[in-house]
Amino acid sequence: MRGMEAINEVHVSEPGLVVVDVAAADDETAFAFHTALAARWAATSVERTTRDAGQPGVRLRCYLDLCQPLNAPGQAPTLR
């Protein structure tokens, strides 16, 4: 994604850390996807999306820690 900053080494410095770049049709869709991720794993908050000139839709970046699941052990994630 052209408008996104380079991924910093610290964001992927150990297993379980993930950088997620999202492309979506609109803000509502991008934020809904982030909300679904954040309901399952520790995630950074996001306040805005970006638009790249000449590119369709919006972009969003967030960071997850898969080693910090938010659901109780044995409970399946609900991504509705």
Image (cartoon, rainbow, N blue to C red):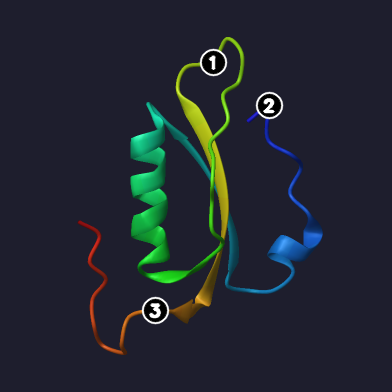
Q: CA distance from mark 3 to mark 2?
A: 32 Å
Badge 3 element: loop
Which tag, 1 or 2, sits closer to the chain's start?
2
Badge 2 element: loop
Which image quadrant is residue 15 in? bottom right
Name which residue type carries label 1. Answer: Gln
Q: Is residue 34 left or right of residue 6?
A: left
Which image quadrant is residue 72 in? bottom left
Q: Which mark is residue 2?
A: 2
The residue pinned by badge 1 equals 55
Name which residue type carries label 2. Answer: Arg
What percent of the width, then of the height, locates residue 70? Answer: 39, 79
Q: CA distance from mark 1 to mark 3?
A: 34 Å
Classify 10 Å Cα crowding around label 1: few (below 14), some (14-19), many (20 and above).
few
Question: Are the residues tagged 1 and 2 within 8 Å (C-beta)?
Answer: yes
Classify 10 Å Cα crowding around label 3: few (below 14), some (14-19), many (20 and above).
some
